[in-house]
Amino acid sequence: MKHHFSRRDFLRTSAALAAVPVLSSAGLAVSPNGKLRTAHIGVGGMGGADLSSIASHPKVEVAALCDVDLDRLNQAKSQHPQAKIFRDFREMLSSLGDTIDAVVVSTPDHTHAPAAMSALNHNKPVYCQKPLTHEVFEARQLRLVAEKKNLPTQMGIQVHSSTPYRRAVAMIQSGMIGKVSRVYAWSNKNWGYDGQATPAEQAPPANLEWNLWLGTAAKRPYAPHVYHPGAWRKMIDFGTGTLGDMGVHIFDTPYAALELTAPKWAKTTCRKPTGVGHPEKNIVEYEFPGTKHTTESLLWTWHDGAFAPPKGEALDLPSLNLPDQGSLFLGEEGQMLLPHVGEAQLFPQEKFRDYQRPEVDGADHYHQWVDACLGEGKTSAGFSYAGPLTEALLLGVVANRYPETKLEWDAERLEITNLPEANKLLRRTYRDGFEVAGL
Ligand SMILES: NC(=O)c1ccc[n+]([C@@H]2O[C@H](COP(=O)([O-])OP(=O)(O)OC[C@H]3O[C@@H](n4cnc5c(N)ncnc54)[C@H](O)[C@@H]3O)[C@@H](O)[C@H]2O)c1
């Protein structure tokens, strides 16, 4: 008998459709008009740039904005008047549910993992600023959960998708400088601080939710110019020093090009730790297991602050005029200098004079993630890549708490094997009331 579609059927189907979110071809929820509804956590500073870059995608609808600083929140709201606003990202995620599709995290480093994991726990794809996390354990957990849920993710290392960096990766992988035995990477920035945590204790300004800004970190009084905005980079409980800030950009190309995994050990040369701020200048050495692009193992040396750039004599290339930030690959058949940011230079110059550089297309790192959320293509710096890169970097940051000590690393067990007391620095205990499932 032919089935007639009754009014009751129609109502039943409409109710079901209303309850089931519209899915993109990636199987993710999107708004009924096919747009990706984004929610942004941290909308001042870099968060403002992230917001404009994501919003410039024609299929994005900015649905929600969250910031603990009311002035910054209002500024972003003036650009996106239709967006709902929040001070607490936990409230935003739980109250908006399926009316948002994807989350952007642009807070200080210590809040990356709590915010990103909370978004993943709500099954939202995440774009998260660099470095992926503040703690090694958090980087491992974010990667595992993102992989298990198969959600599109991207870490905010936008130069990763630029033409010069992609070209440098292609050149190294073509073997044109031979197998690489050593990498130097450096930044002359100084995100160090040898002062006290509260040099001038003050009541927090009225626009700032200080307790929410502290988030998972232990409670302490507010002090001006030490934490918010930006200065938190120098403080061990919130930022990751120059290595975490710039190293993550500058390590990225060598790490990707050489297809590195986890280091065998890390050792830092710096001043004695104070327990408050990161050291002002550091030399961090690593050894990585060899890959098909390297010699049997790879030595990696990072210089920052007044230790950067490394001296030419140390590099055996005394005539080289090094930029303030960049990396240098020493291969068996030549060297590549990669400034941050720009095209690579090759040495010896005569040898590579007629070398034809590969044609490579860059991409918009932000739009790549939006497209992946909408089911088109994949991201290039998803948490499967960003997690291990961040773990390696953060091991070097932990090493600045034990100057001149080689920290032997068992990545599989997430353990420093020769100095058990250092393992406590791999994972923070979250403050009561700020716990996050999975962390
Ligand atoms: N990819 C890049 O080129 C690049 C450049 C600069 C900064 N960054 C990264 O961006 C992040 C932010 O850096 P910044 O210089 O903009 O710092 P910032 O302190 O200037 O800004 C952080 C913003 O987040 C807000 N915020 C802080 N805690 C919050 C919370 N719990 N919930 C919601 N909002 C919160 C602040 O009020 C502020 O608006 C850092 O992780 C940094 O490493 C990346």
Image: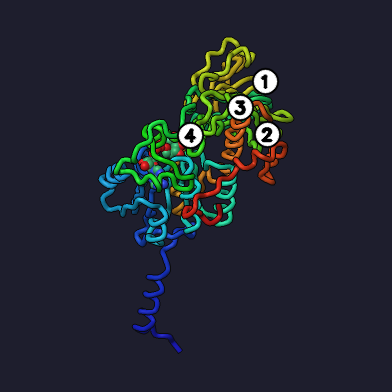
Question: Which of the two discs, 3 and 1, sits closer to the camera?
Answer: 3
> Nearest the camera: 14 or 108?
108
> Nearest the camera: 17 or 2?
17
Position of 350 compared to 371: left or right?
Answer: right
- What amino acid is at disc 4? Met
- What amino acid is at disc 1? Glu
Find disc 4 in the rendering and name its residue.
235
Would you say the residues marked 4 and 2 are in contact, meaning their CB atoms lie under 8 Å apart?
A: no
Mark number, residue 333: 1
Q: Residue furthest bottom?
A: 1
Find disc 2 in the rendering and name its residue.
407
- What amino acid is at disc 3? Val
Question: How far is disc 2 from disc 1 in space, using C-alphas?
Answer: 31 Å
Question: How far is disc 4 from disc 2 in space, using C-alphas?
Answer: 22 Å
Find disc 3 in the rendering and name its residue.
284
Counting residues from the start of the chain, the first of labels 3 and 1 encountered is 3
Residue 401 position in % (x across, y down): 59, 32
Q: Can residue 319 be seen here?
A: yes
Would you say the residues marked 3 and 1 are in contact, meaning their CB atoms lie under 8 Å apart?
A: no
